[in-house]
Amino acid sequence: MRIFKIKAFNKWAKGLLTDDSLLAAVDEIIAGNYDASLGQKIFKQRVATGNTGKSGSMRTILAFHEGDNVFFMYGFSKGKRANISDKEMRALQKAAKVLFALKGEKLSDEIKAGRLVEIKRKPKKKK
C-alpha cells in the first residue's frame, strides 16, 4: 500500500500537517478507527496539528481501499467549515475512482508531473 497526497492537498497541508501525522491517520483507518465513511471508499479523518492533539485538528478527506493505494484529497479546518457539501462529496467520489485506476506507469507519470506526492514511511530503527 502506497500513500499519496494530491497536489492541491499537499499545497494546503504544507506547514499545517506533517507526513507522520498523515501516516498515523492512515494507520487509524486501517485499524477501523475513522471519523466517518462517506461512501464509495471515501473517509473523513481528523489529523492532529502540532502538539494540540485532535481537539485542534484538521479534517482530511481521503480515498482508502484496503490493499490499494491511499490518496489524501482534501482538507479543511473545523473552524472554517463543518463539513463538505453533497456536491463536493460526489466530485471526490468520482476523483477517487480515477485515482484508484492509476497503476504502474500511469501512477509514475502522475508523480513525475507533480500531481501526486508520495508519503514514504521512515524505516524502523533496529534495536
Image: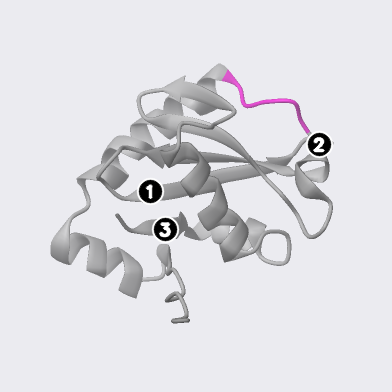
Left or right of residue 29, residue 35 in this image: right
The first of marks 1 and 2 along the sequence is: 1
83 in magenta: yes
Q: Mark 1 vs mark 2: give the one in front.
A: 1
Kindly identify the amino acid type of the residue bearing the numbered disc 2.
Lys
Left or right of residue 44, residue 6 in this image: left
Image location (x, y in percent) of residue 52: 84, 51
The first of marks 1 and 3 along the sequence is: 3
- Tag shown at residue 80: 2
Quarter of the rendering containing residue 17 = bottom right
Residue at 42% across / 69% down in the picture? 120
Label 3 sits on residue: 4
Real-space CA distance between mark 3 and mark 2, rounded to the nearest whole angstrom = 24 Å
Kindly identify the amino acid type of the residue bearing the numbered disc 3.
Phe
Label 1 sits on residue: 70
Residue at 25% across / 44% down in the picture? 67
Instruction: Give 26 or 110, whichever is nearer the viewer.
Output: 26
The first of marks 3 and 2 along the sequence is: 3
In the image as oriented, which residue stretches furthest toward the top? 86
Q: Secondary structure at mark 3?
A: strand
Dot 3 surroundings within 10 Å: few (below 14), some, or many (20 or more)? many
Magenta range is 81-85
Real-space CA distance between mark 1 and mark 3, rounded to the nearest whole angstrom = 6 Å
